[in-house]
Every structure is written in structure tokens, then in C-alpha cells.
Image (cartoon, rainbow, N blue to C red):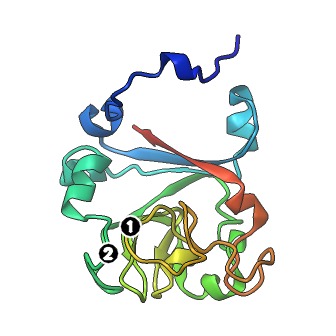
Amino acid sequence: MSTFFDPDTVPLKWDPNPGYYDIVAEDMSVWHVPNNFPLEHWNLAAILRYHTDNRFLRLYGGNLFQLFKQYPVRYNAGSCSNRGPSIPIVYDHGEESTRMLYGANSRAEFEPGFITFRAINNQRAATAICSGVKPAGCNAEHYCVGGGGYFQADQCGDFPSFHHDRLDLKGWSASKEMTEAAVLLFYR
């Protein structure tokens, strides 16, 4: 049985996702799943799967909504050296490939094995999540997702500058696998 989006049944007023606001969790899992894979194959198809296991969400109100209240994702909310927490991760799949999913220039700016929240770039724009990495540089737009605030005109969307050099894995550009995957966040 498949489901689809029916615009005639959409309510006029959208309510926020109750999971983001209301669920209280201790840890989270992140999967990077290539687009257009059926749900039953997500586990095997994922290019990265990892989780936290240190109950870090207890320190930040139990969910991402509360964490981002402490570390807002907006322009000029911090600086390159004033980012949110970096939490160690346990890889379920992809540990050996994390570094290679990002461009050559990006690889010198991060340490694999973490999930980082609210990283700030040189232009003081905030990105929401650095998936699988802990930034050591100030060009988070090339390896972190989500965003708030100023990005250059050609940097928009949830992957603000993953195709900066327009070539797969050249310069600042991430791999095609990374840019064409959905980032799935699960509370644990």
C-alpha cells in the first residue's frame, strides 16, 4: 500500500511537527539515504548511518527544539569559534567513507566521528547540523546542512554550498551521493 500527498486534504493551518517539540529523548540516529529508495531498503541503501550513545539530549532539554533554543540557527548568532555542541557518534555504517563524501578542501576543515549543531561560517551564517563531522574550520556551508541567515546568492537550500565547484569531489564540492541523499533524523 502506498500513500501520496492529497492537496485537498491539507488543513488550512499547519501545526508544527509534534515530535520535534514534544518527544523527550536521550540520543539520536542519523541516516543519509539516497533519494527514491523504498522505505524497506533504507537500512541497506544508506551511505551513512550512525547514532549517539551518551544521552547528550538530557543536557539540552531532551530534543532538538530545546537544543536549538540554546543555540539558535540564525545569522550572527555566534562566530566560527562559537558553535554549538559536537557530540561523538557510533557508526552503524560508513565510518571508513565519511571523509571521502566531502570535497578535498572540506576534508582539511573537519574531524569525522561527530555530529555538530549550529556551526557558523566565515560570513556568520549558521548551519543546523554537521552530519558525521566536527568542524575545525570556518567554511561549514560546504559540509553542514540546514541554515539560517546570510549565504552567498548561489548558496541556498538545506545543502548551501555542497556543489560549490560544480564538480563531484573537486575543491569544496561534496560527492553526488551526499548531495542526493535525504538526511533522516531519529530520536532514540
Residue 100 vs residue 106, the one in the foreground: 106
Q: How many marks?
A: 2
Query: Which residue is at a point 50% across and 84% down the rendered structure image?
Result: 139
Q: Are marks 2 and 1 in contact (CB under 8 Å)?
A: yes
- Mark positioned earlier in the residue sequence (2 or 1): 2
Which quarter of the rendered picture does the N terminus lie within? top right
Rendered location of residue 6, percent (x, y): 58, 20
Query: Which residue is at a point 39% across and 37% down the rendered structure image?
Result: 188
- The numbered disc on residue 148 is 1
Q: Amino acid at mark 2?
A: Tyr
Rendering quarter of residue 19: top left
Q: Amino acid at mark 1?
A: Gly
Residue 183 vs residue 11, the one in the foreground: 11
Q: In the figure, is residue 28 to the left or right of 161?
A: left
Query: Which residue is at a point 27% across and 48% down the rendered structure image?
Result: 65
Q: Tell me the element at label 1.
A: loop
